[in-house]
Image (cartoon, rainbow, N blue to C red):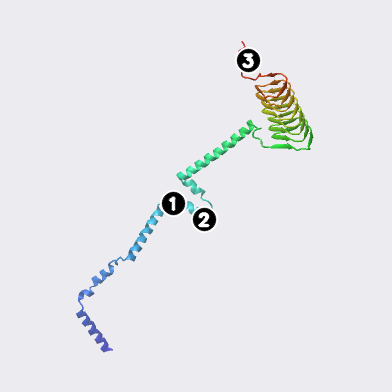
Amino acid sequence: MGFFKDFKGDFSQAVNELMPEEMFDDNQVVNTLDEEPAQTEDTLAIGEKTAESDDLVNTYDNVDMDILDAILTSDEEGGDLENLNEMEEIPESDELEEQNLIQSKTIAEKEEKVTMDEENRMDNPTENTDEITVITKGTVINGSINADGSLDVMGTIKGDVECLGKLSIYGAVTGNCMAHEVFVGAKRLEGCISSEGSVKIGLGTVIIGDITASSGVIAGAVKGEIDINGPIIIDSSAVVKGNIKAQSIQINNGAIIDGFCSLPYASVDIENIFE
């Protein structure tokens, strides 16, 4: 053991003599350890990520803490974010505002159209009524009939008939008829006819009663007074026994009239012409 210890001491002394003293300078070793390590690519990447993290932290530092507290409180309590919306209103984009404006205009136009349709229906109920009541063939009614819409009579009615729409008579009616528009295609009708619009008497129809309307076309036979506050056409197949008053009269060749024709509703003042 003493041999090896002496050998070790001699070997250490020989190494110290061969190596320069600067290699074992304590200050150099300490300074070497204190120096920062060389920045490799991995070190630079780590540094960039650290900087990004610092920026992210700084970004969150700029967020309104009241808003964050409201979000956290809403999540914890299971509620909605109505308080957050009250704290900060999010402005709508121009596109969203334009869409809302277009939608509002569309709704306003629809409401205006519905209002106009209702007003037209109230002003002209007969023109806007699509409901048609049909009295079928073989049906006999003893009594008067009043309909809000149009009425087609193919059966037999013994009583007055009144409707707001169009009255079309193909069956037998005994009674007065009143409607916005009247067409008679039956063989015989006994009663007066009154219409706010036109009256048309078909070929082969016999009317026993007076006729009052704003316009008329007579192709059948009428026994009674005809008072038309507008134009009237007496067709070539017509036979009229009674007086005719109208604004203008067209009498086709072949028509038979037993009565007086006058034009009291004409726009021409006849008396002034002969003065």
Which of the numbered marks, if any, corresponds to residue 1? Answer: none
Q: Residue at image x 44%, y 51%?
A: 65
Mark 2–mark 1 Cα distance, whole angstroms, equals 16 Å
Q: Is residue 269 left or right of residue 26?
A: right
Label 1, label 3: how many angstroms apart (C-alpha)? 96 Å
Q: Secondary structure at mark 1?
A: helix
Above or below, 260 against 16 in this view is above
Asked whether disc 1 touches disc 3, contact meaning CB atoms under 8 Å apart, the reply is: no
Badge 3 amino acid: Ile
Residue occupying image coordinates x 37% and y 56% = 55
- Asked which quadrant contains residue 114, the reply is top right
Labels 3, 2: front one = 3
Q: Which residue is mark 2?
A: 76
Q: Nearer the viewer, mark 1 or mark 3?
A: 3
In the visual, does 82 lie left or right of 127?
A: left
At 69% from the left edge and 32% from the top edge, which residue is drawn? 166
Judge from the rendering whether residue 71 lies leftward or rightward of residue 62; answer left or right: right
Would you name the residue on which mark 3 appears? 270
Residue 146 is situated, as x and y percent measured from the top left of the image, at 73, 32
